[in-house]
Amino acid sequence: MLASDAPTLATAPSGEAPALRVRGLSYSLADRVLFDGLDLQVARGESVAVTGASGSGKSTLLSCVLGLIKPGEGTVAVTGTPTTGLSGKRMARVRSESIGMVFQFGELLPELTPVENVALAPLLSRTATTPSGDPKSEDPFVRAEGLLTDLGVPVRTATSRLSGGERQRTAVARALMNAPGLLLADEPTGALDADTRELVADLLFSLPRRHSCGLLVVTHDVTVAQRADRVLHLRHGRLTPADRASAPDEVRP
Amino acid sequence: MKRTGLSRRLLRIGHAAGQHAEAGHIRFVALLCAALVLTLGGASAVAVHAVYEGKAQRVAAREPAVATGTAQRAQAAYQVSSDWLADRRQYDIVFLAPLTSDVPLPPGVRGWPSAGEVLLSPALREAGAGEGIEERYGRTVGTIADDGLADGSERFAYIVVKPQELHSRYASRISGFGPGDGAGQGRVGPYPRDDQPEWMFQALIVGMLFLPGLALAWVASRTGARARDRRMALIASLGGRASDRALIACGEAWRPVLCGIALGAAATGAAAWRGVRLPVTGYVIEAADLQRWWWPATLLVPLAAALCLFAVVLLFDRPASGRRQRMVRPGQGHRRSPMVWAMLCPVMLFLGVQGARFFPPENPARLFATWAGTAGTLATLPAAVAVTAAALGRGLARIGRRRRLPGLLVAGRRTAAHPRTVARMVAGVAIALCLLFQAVAWQMIFGQQATAAQLTLDRIGLSTLEVGPKGGGKRAQARFVTRLPQGTETALFSTPGARGVRIAGDCTALRTLALPCPGDEGASTALNERPSDPRVRELLAWKAFPDAAVTVTRDRNATRKPVDAENGSTLILTSRDGEDLDVAALKELAYDSFPRGARIDAPGADYLVGGAPNRDQGRWSVLLGIAALTILALAAGLSGMAEHLRSGRALAPLTALAGGTGIFRTTAAWGVGMPLLLAGLTGTLAGGWLAQPLVGPRGLEVPAALTTVSLLVVALLGLLMWWWAATAAARQADAWQPGEQD
């Protein structure tokens, strides 16, 4: 069913669960049907961009993946773990261990240093572990500093003085801190100028292969979306492969 | 669209926005509380006026009309005396002797009792129940009704005696009571003797209820202001006029304001229906007084409070303008460092507490130094708190980082980055506490003699009493002395010379007071040493000059002769075993022996009696001061809470992903709870220190109960606000979803 219904599904490496698998997702808001048997699979190392008109349900899809919204029907599995029906506590654990997210406005705390902002995620989830799984063998602040340096963010500058691009790269570093299997990005370049947008998009789409995670990007921006391995268009509650050469009018920025 | 339709729509927009606004619940509660406080403040002002007016009317109605001879026939003999219970609150008792059979009744009295019978006010009957008040003045046959009393708390008595018992030159011949009978020559009863003028009370209401209420209203108006500021900017950019923005603001605020004034009006209505006994002071506000003013109290005042609150909302709930609004990134504003002011604070505190020591006694500069230090401390306190908070924040962040505690890290960084937020919270409450302590300290200074008398009482208790008979002669005094309880010795204390003192009595009495007894009856001896009995020392301290020559005379009949009080003579009663004498029983005996009883109390207790009104008025300061403190602490807490929710919103996406909403417990503790607790501690410490130069040299102390209650109020509010802020922030984070914006 999945193979026949899902649009251009990438095949996961043998024996490894996909980063994200969504099957038969249905969700309605009042009398509006947002998802009508929606299917989606994102493999590790793969990037998928979802475009769609405003109000088509892109952000709601992310909420369903995050377990913040209970769908009417269908299942969601993150790195092989079915999340629909999980208790709040267990879902929170899945989120903290397996999902990283980049927001449109970065959502950094201006009072904290960039390093502290990045280290906050593992501190909050109490998973101050290294990507290798060795608990607390490395200080999260040291790791955060390393990540930020890799991403070219000045670590000695106050967060409130970072540029838009630097803020977004800091947010990316924070999303990677818990070594997630699935990375979500909600309009990650929506608040950036053209040059910075290119830089952040380059960084973002390089992550799946470098960190062996799946990337699901929700965006209005066709030029950003086209960098993904697959581009899907959300319309009438279903995902359909978007025409890469000429994207639909409604998804133009 | 018609203007009325548009107005209605704008009001609806505001109403809908209010229900879904950032920190909406907090603003609702803040506005509700502000409306409630302003309504109760206004109702209090009306109640004060109603009570003063009602008291004046009732007291005027019971004033005796002095008979002028030909025009008015003397119907009764009338004389006022006074007495007090163990709490030394003086009250008037009226001796009445009907001279004719058709004597008019004073208000509150339904029928004339017979001679020897007594009518008491309910408050006196209740307060004196443990002191045998119903038997003290004669046989109590009833109570005085409310229309004959200044208020429900008044202690008052009518004692009916035979005409021949009021032969004193102080008794008046009267023809009736009240203006109708031609009264107006003088007032009877404690009003207005013990009451401050009405304007002083009204000023207290303004300072302790209105101003804190306005502070709360200001905080409420700015709570969750960011989203509203955006909305208002949008309305303005779409061509909305000031009146349109005002309608939206009113639409947003009307519901909590209506709830607040409705609660206030209901509380006022309940008080007007049944009357109310106020805590701390025990004062009873008469329902009848409030009922005369019910419509201003329950209709006009709430309306005025609502208008006042809408005015505050419209005045202050506007987007920031100028430099701050032009900033591109947060945290870029540069402000002058408060370090200089902060460093001045301990200097000012030192000046306030120790400054007087650098000047000789009686030098006016001593008081000036204390005042300047106190004012300087209050002025520099916010800066000191801000600097301390910033340092504390940096320390917390270091600990949080070292121990990997995200809550401490975030709270510390926030405090370090925004110390003024904490400073505003702490300083407002701390300054209010300092001012309250100052008010109480000044009140205590005015009652300094009373406090010294209390110290005497603490040292020797009631083992020695002074007796000042009112009327009666040798026979009355003999009747009193011979019926004294076993173990009671009597002596006569007199001041025959300009600076001399004589203590006369039989040998037993003199020896009871550890005084030498001369060998022969009638002989005297000079006392050259300091008396060894503390009771004699206290007597001399209160009744003689410090260098007075003391003579001891052996005279077994000294206490049988009438006491000449006008020449400084006093009958002294002493318990042989050093235990307290039963004052209530002795007073009953005195009223049975002397025509108008006797003043009986410990040495110096007159000052306690004189200081009682001051003490009672001090209770009003404490009651209203604690109310003001509560309102200000609430305002500070709500302001901190709104700030916490605003910053908690920034944390919401991260906590939704990474879990750990427990972080809000920590950030709320350090952002809301701790500042309030710190405010309580800082305020009581600084307030106590600053009050010390006023009360310390006089052997007084700021009451521990005041410190405890103040701390308790602030701590409880801090705890409540902490819990609320943590819960609300966690709920806000739980509700977060991707794509959500402010």
Image (cartoon, rainbow, N blue to C red):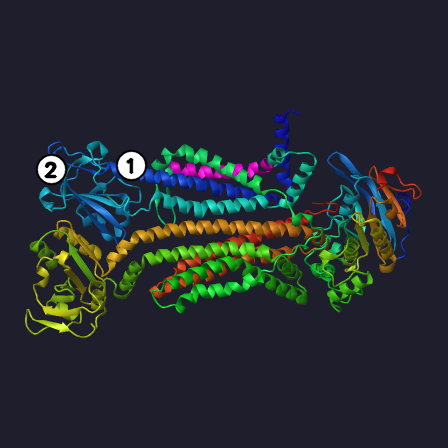
Mark 2 — on which chain does it sit?
B
Q: Is A64 in front, or is B164? A: B164
Q: Is residue A164 magenta?
A: no
Dominant secondary structure, magenta = helix
**Mark 2 lies on residue:** B99
User: In the drawing, does residue B366 fall left or right of residue B637?
Assistant: left
- Circle 1 packing at 10 Å, graded few (<14), some (14-19), many (20+), is some
Report how far apart the C-alphas of labels 1 and 2 lie in the structure: 27 Å
Which residue is at a point 36% across and 49% down the rendered structure image? B281
Quadrant the N terminus of chain B occupies: top right
Which residue is at a point 30% across and 41% down the rendered structure image? B151
Q: Is B354 in front, or is B590? A: B354
The span picked out in magenta is B249-273
**Vertically, is A222 above or below B589?**
above
Q: Position of residue B92 (x, y in %)?
A: 23, 47
The kind of residue tagged 2 is Leu
Mark 1 — on which chain does it sit?
B
Residue B172 seen in the current view: yes
Judging from the image, what secondary structure is the residue with disc 2 in? loop
Which residue is at a point 13% across and 35% down the rendered structure image? B68
Judging from the image, what secondary structure is the residue with disc 1 in? helix
Quadrant the C terminus of chain B occupies: top right
**Mark 1 lies on residue:** B57
Q: Position of residue B371 (x, y in %)?
A: 42, 59
Q: Quadrant of residue B693?
A: bottom left
Q: Is residue B257 magenta?
A: yes
- Circle 2 packing at 10 Å, graded few (<14), some (14-19), many (20+), is some
**Vertically, is B362 above or below B86?**
below
Q: Position of residue B694 (x, y in %)?
A: 38, 61
The kind of residue tagged 1 is Gln
